Amino acid sequence: MHMTRPARRAALAALSVTAAVALTACAGAGSSSGGNTAQKIDVLTTISKDPVTLTLAYTNDPPTKALIDGFTKRHPNVTIKPQMTPFNDYIKSIKLAMSGDAAPDIAQYNPGAMNSLVPAGLILDLGPWAKAYGWTTKFPPASIEVLSSDKAAKQFGTGSLYAVPGGLSVLGVFYNKKIVKEAPKTLAEFEAAMQKAKDAGQTPLANGALQVGGFHLWNALLNVTGDINDYRGWVYGKPGSTIETPAAKQATQTLIDWAKKGYISKGASATADADALAAFSKGGSAFLITGNWAASTLETEMKDDVGFFLMPTASGEPAKVASGASVAYAISAKSKNPNVAAAFLDYLSSPEAAKIEFDGGFMPVDTKAELGATGLRGEIATVFASVAQNNGIVPFPDFASPGMIDKLTPGIQGLINDKMTADAFLKSLQESWDAHHGS
Amino acid sequence: MAREATSPVSPSRAATARGGGQAASGHARPGHWRGRRARGWLYVLPALAVYLGFAIWPAITTLRLSLLTWDGILPPVWAGLDNYVKIFRDSALYEAILHSLVLIVFFSVIPIAAGLLMTALLMGKVRRGMTFFRIVFFLPQVLPLVAVGITWRWLYSESGVVNQFLDAVGLGSITRAWLGDYGLALVALGLIGTWVMSGLCMMLFLAGAQKIDPSLYEAATLDGAGAYRQFLHVTLPGVRKEITVAGVITTIAALASFDLVFVTTNGGPAGQTNVPGLLVYRLAFNEGDIGGASALAVVLTVIVIAVVAAVRYFTRDDAS
């Protein structure tokens, strides 16, 4: 009797490890009905005055709720019920919700979930509405290109459109104006400014390489050294693409050099993004590489002492490429009111929505909208608009394959700790790419 | 395999209870006996249903899923042993297992040693304030591991308390971001486990030692045994069962560790603290490879059972 107790404990504990996976998994098994709706839908760009209720599943707020309010104010007969899921659970929950019978009409787009939902035919091809509404001119081209994919949802920038954005983001460099007088114009000036900060006993660059901060830094460097089409093709999964290019190697080598020179501390590997942001906002470092989503926190903490610039190029000409993501929305193939849902999607490109998106901390979809913004966010909006209008927004590298983030984060840590070469790093990324897309 | 490991438990208990009942009722008629038997099952049913539904069924499902290629949505495809072949070919698995074996030292061996030491020091000497000590040492068990992990991440950071202390005592030259150090991150992580587990071990051993008949200590004293010999020949055999339990619990915590690693290092720097639990999570929820994740979970379960069996073998009581 006594001897069996530990055995059962052991088995129970061991089971609990497996149970988490199994429970999530088998919950999905029952409801994985394909929703391939072949029926013809009449595409309309006007919506009737009858009362309609839609549901919208999302994880990012702002801007979602404010956009819903803006839209329903314009169309009082439409009610949109928001269904919020925390980010960590969103991929799992949206997969189940969209394949269930009571699928939400509109769902926030997530590449991790869509690579199952699009092949299953559960997401509506927005092509007819894009044509009817003229979305290719209303949304920045790069922002909808990344939301288009083939039927297998493996290759992007091709095939059908599955979502449109309701708020964009952009990656750049924040600097502390108390430490750095003027934003550097060239890569050499940037390095000189970091050296100066280091000589003065300050941390040049706060970086959260425990999470995404490390590869965002690498990504920003790659944007100014590499060819946009090479990178875009690779992230989109264009057959035959590779990241093992001289430009990528050069960007990687620059990162290694910066770590060796002490611009990035070895401790970055154990620093979370939030901790890096907190350190920078308290004056603990001269620079911080992250996206516009940090702007409102930094403005509150640092007032006028913070500025923003895009990673400078070696030649000094203004950067034309920057990474960014979007909060985008897709329509369920099971929706009974796809025209109403499409009207909501169209609303996202309006100047009115642009204001809501910007106030929510995002870059607006309508890049020409008059925002009347000043200060830090005005600064960001200005540099963003020029890049977006030149079609220079590219996705983050973790977009390239589902397992990529688990190569990027440890890889960058290896580079910072001088335990990995540039070649080995790029090779590990390409292996993940090949495993997903086929070499 | 989970079924094999667990099935001897419930039936044997039921059998004992039944046997006991039978003995008490003497010559029971067969029909009456059958009724008692059915009633017995009725009592067991709620617990059994929960156990089957939340432990056995998920385990079987995991085993089944490990033989499929499935992303969670599209119809699953039979894969045979492909998932297993794939994970065994990946060197990441072996590194992760190696790391979790190192963690056993910090989660299990050191805490048990520390627990025994504390027991030896406290037993029979501290009469007042025992509850205070127990609460203080048990506190880490009460805190959520995620909170523990984040707090330790800050303690270990470049300007954290650990480095401030080292600076203060003149060891400024060895300060670093401990969890970000390529060579020492695993040790730093392991020491968090030591901190969490030591109190639990001490609690178990103290409870066990209090059951030891004081006359044994008196007899040992009369025979001229000092404190060390008393500990070795009276206390240690007295808490043998508790050592087994502590060994099993802490070993599982080391092998199946996930939450602590996830929030402190997430496997970093550069995969130096990857553990199997993290790889399962990434496969299932980052890559959407339910089959591969299930296969890895099954392998992890087998490893846990094997190591636990070994722990029980080495701490077995030869006398009984």
Image (tube, rainbow, N blue to C red):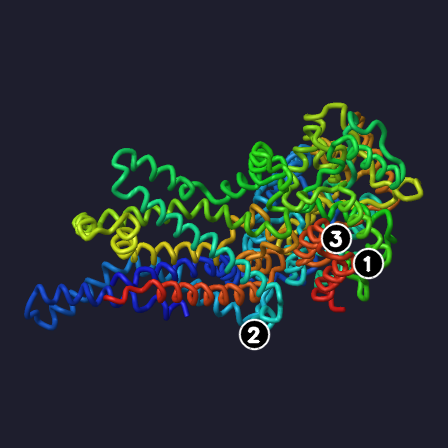
- Write the residue at 61% across / 63% down: B92
Label 2 marks a residue whose chain is B
Residue A419: percent from left, percent from top: 71, 55
Classify mark 3: residues with Cα within 10 Å, few (<14), some (14-19) or many (20+).
many
Residue B110: percent from left, percent from top: 44, 52
In the rendered view of the protein, which quadrant contains the N terminus of chain A?
bottom left
Q: CA distance from mark 2 to mark 3?
A: 32 Å
Q: Which residue is mark 2?
A: B78
Which quadrant of the view contains residue B57?
Answer: bottom left
Which residue occupies the foreground of this view, A7 or A292?
Answer: A7
Q: Which residue is mark 3?
A: A397
- Write the residue at 64% across / 51% down: B182
Which residue occupies the foreground of this view, B199 or A246?
Answer: B199
Q: Residue furthest bottom?
A: B80
Label 1 marks a residue whose chain is A
Task: Determine whether B255 is above or below B67 in the image.
Answer: above
| Mark 1 or 3: the one toward you | 3
> Do badges 2 and 3 share one subunit?
no
Q: Residue B30 vs residue A256: left or right?
A: left
Q: CA distance from mark 2 to mark 1?
A: 33 Å
Which quadrant of the view contains residue B282?
Answer: bottom right
Task: State whether residue A377 appears in this view.
Answer: no
Task: Determine whether B160 is above or below B306 in the image.
Answer: above
Q: Residue furthest front?
A: B224
Task: State whether residue A297 appears in this view.
Answer: yes
Which residue occupies the foreground of this view, A334 or B9?
Answer: B9
Q: Residue furthest top?
A: A304
Q: CA distance from mark 1 to mark 3?
A: 11 Å
Q: Which residue is mark 1?
A: A233
Residue type at numbered disc 3: Pro
